Image: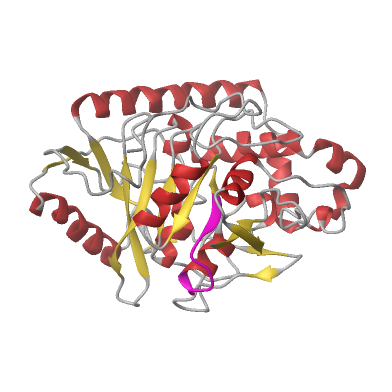
Amino acid sequence: VPFLVKDLENLEGFPTTYGSRAYQNVSKEIKDEVHIQRLKSAGAIAIGKTNTPELGLVPFTDNEVFGTTRNPWNLERTPGGSSGGSAAALASGMISMATASDGGGSIRIPACYTGLFGFKPSYGRVPIGPRETDYWLDTVCYGPLTRSVRDAAIMLDVMAGPAAIDRNSLPAIDYSYRDHLEDPIPRLRIAFNRTLGVTRVQSDVMREVEAAVDTFRSMGHEVEENDDRIPEIGGYWRKIGAFNHLSQQWSKYAQEGNRFGAIASAAFPYGFRTDAEDFSHFVQIRQTLISWTAEIFSSYDLLLTPTLPTEAFQAEGPAPTTLDGKRFSPIAFTYPFNFTGHPAASVRAGFTDSGLPCGLQIVGPRHRDD
């Protein structure tokens, strides 16, 4: 089976540009990352790389090296980011399998905008590496982005499992996701939260999400409305995330900072302005989120939310900041579960009035990728 690799991941024989002019002409020996090695060993054939926003920093796919990636459902719209190139290739039928990564929604966002199945596994389920610097913020996950749940299960069976190169990789489990796809599901207790108390949702998106939630009821599961309000962590995420990226890119930035493009250059100043007080607030809010999810999953088997509040926006960006004339957060549903480490998927819920896909996010208990 041929497959494509996101250009934030290392594939032998291809440059890793990170969508940045700073790496466009870098010549060095590149070795496959662990999950790429495993896919190849299982018989998959890597045929190229997919586009990504610079350093994966924004939820749309546009950079100064390869330009704008567009949504096959509407070429004026974005396929999302940062795994937007992989999503566009899959949704257009160009390929049946592509790798993706998710540090704040970068698998689930493009899955939602292009009608795919995107799965962010538990943190550490798929190993990351070898890398020159450590992902110390502990939010990034590698996972499948596919046109079907079955394809995702096949990919995860191959990619998952411990690796000595990754300090966070989880122990092996004696379980095949593919083999158990058709197993009967017991009656589940499910919580449905419409906004998490931190954003607004486009009306036709909510209509489709509500219909998708009703599907669980029709299957015999118990679904309860949940109106908990989580802390809004987006501002701290931007600062701490920028500091994380700046620390990873410091050698390159110190030598050739002017070669980074507009996206990185806009993000890095947040890193310079981050201080101990910011970090203190961030880790406190992160722990609040972890405690909240622990409470949720002590009572429920699954948590449902919209994947994103809107349909896909303009291909060149930027992401919208207002909805119906009021401010909102465009990706508020995805990044909380990067901070908590829970497995989370986006499945197509339906279509908006414009004929664009929208998604339902399904979040599972800790380490329950099954």
Q: Position of residue 151 (x, y in %)?
A: 41, 56
Q: Which segment did they paint magenta?
A: 91-100
Q: Is residue 190 left or right of residue 309?
A: left
Indicate the colouring scheme.
Answer: secondary structure
Between residue 60 and residue 320, name the one nearer to us.
60
In this figure, what is the number of numbered marks? 0
Between residue 157 and residue 115, name the one nearer to us.
157
Q: Which residue is at a point 52% across and 71% down the rendered structure image?
A: 314
Q: Is residue 150 left or right of residue 269?
A: left
Q: Is residue 244 left or right of residue 223?
A: right
Quadrant (top left, top right, bottom left, bottom right) of the C terminus: top left
Between residue 200 and residue 264, name the one nearer to us.
264
Q: Is residue 296 magenta?
A: no
Between residue 166 and residue 337, name the one nearer to us.
166
Q: Position of residue 143 (x, y in %)?
A: 49, 46
User: Is residue 329 in sight in this rendering?
Assistant: no
Prevailing secondary structure of the magenta residues:
loop
Asked if residue 299 is positioned above or below residue 28 in the image, the reply reads above
Q: Is residue 366 left or right of residue 1?
A: left
Q: Is residue 97 magenta?
A: yes
Q: Which residue is at a point 69% across and 55% down the rendered structure image?
A: 54
